[in-house]
Image (cartoon, grey):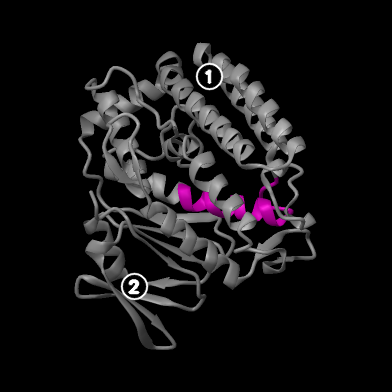
Amino acid sequence: MKQHLNTLFVTTEGTYLAKDGMAVAVRMEKKTRLRIPLHNLDGIVCFGRVGVSPSLMAICGESGVTISMTDAHGRFRAAIIGYSPGNVLLRRTQYRVADDPSKSCEIARIMVAAKLANCRAVLLRAARDSRVESRRSTLTTAARRLVTNLEAARACDSLERLRGIEGEGASTYFEAFSAMVNVPEDAFQFTSRSRRPPLDPLNALLSFLYALLAHDARSACEAAGLDAAVGFLHRDRPGRPGLALDLMEEFRPFLADRLALSLINRRQISASGFTTSPTGAVNMNDATRKTLLKAYQVRKQKTMLHPFLQEKTSVGIMIHLQARLLARHLRGDVDAYPAFVWR
């Protein structure tokens, strides 16, 4: 599974990707600027106007390399995915569980509880590192309130109610988000979550990171033989990868939110790296986007101990392991889905 580490991000519009033997040739202005062996890639993400040759699409499909097409802001448009290696019996089981509200809720509440626990861990770690008493108080208060949501999620037996609990927990978490920002720039003060379009630089960062995480979660679901479109918490909607969105919930605070905060607090990203369009949408410039993509890849290479398997692995592999553990649960090999809880 160690080959599932690298994602090729293509951010320059006008780039053309072609097959060159068993490698991806990255061409700009009719010249090959880069050549990457396919066996080193887990996925390719194309931003904006990027062309892909039919022969490369075919070999990527055969090799299990997912190609995601997004707009220039990272919003998902389409994916090119090959034949799923999964067992048809596994997918049938997934569909039966997804159609059963009670069984769906059993899995969904574990995922929501893990997400809330990871949000709480992010708050407590920031409180521990903060030197400002008022911020520490804000963060520890929010963490205490999340315990109530966490206990409610664990006891919940209704998907509808569970979505409400998840929403309440998210509100508590994001209300305290600004207390984790340690730079004086007003542009990074968080007021509320805004999407489509993001209305401030911090929301633009989060939306972009969530798009990257969704790509990785979709690839992990497909590699494990699951249908990325059929979720348990996120119900069916045309074009929505419901299971990938389910799977990424437990990783949002740990992987995306903490990375955004680290880049801001270390001043690797500044407010000057963003522009506001006449419609109010906030976009990041190319330099900021490249900094973010590089940091995301570096974070995925970090090694940590898997809390359930008790084995050291990289963060990028962790998403694949969770998809495989979910598949094992659906097959009946594991009694309950062991969600990722950051410790």
Is residue 197 something one can see in this rendering?
no
**Mark 2 residue element:** loop
Whether residue 235 sits left or right of residue 160 in the image: it is left
Q: Amino acid at mark 2?
A: Ser
Q: Is residue 209 magenta?
A: yes
Residue displayed at 73% across by 32% down: 138
Q: Nearer the viewer, residue 319 or 120?
A: 120
Residue drawn at (45%, 41%), measured in percent from left and top?
241
Residue 69: x, y in percent? 46, 60
Q: Where is mark 2, residue-wise?
A: 53
Overall secondary structure of the magenta section: helix
Identify the image quadrant of residue 309: top left
Q: In the rendered image of this protein, does residue 232 appear above or below residue 25?
A: above
Above/below status of 17 relative to 145: below
Q: State left or right for residue 204 relative to residue 222.
A: right
Q: Residue placed at 71% from the left, 60% from the top?
A: 282
CB under 8 Å between callouts 2 and 1?
Answer: no
Which of the 4 image quadrants contains residue 53? bottom left
CA gap, disc 2 to disc 1? 43 Å
Which contiguous range is marked in magenta?
Answer: 194-213
Specify the amino acid type for callout 1.
Leu
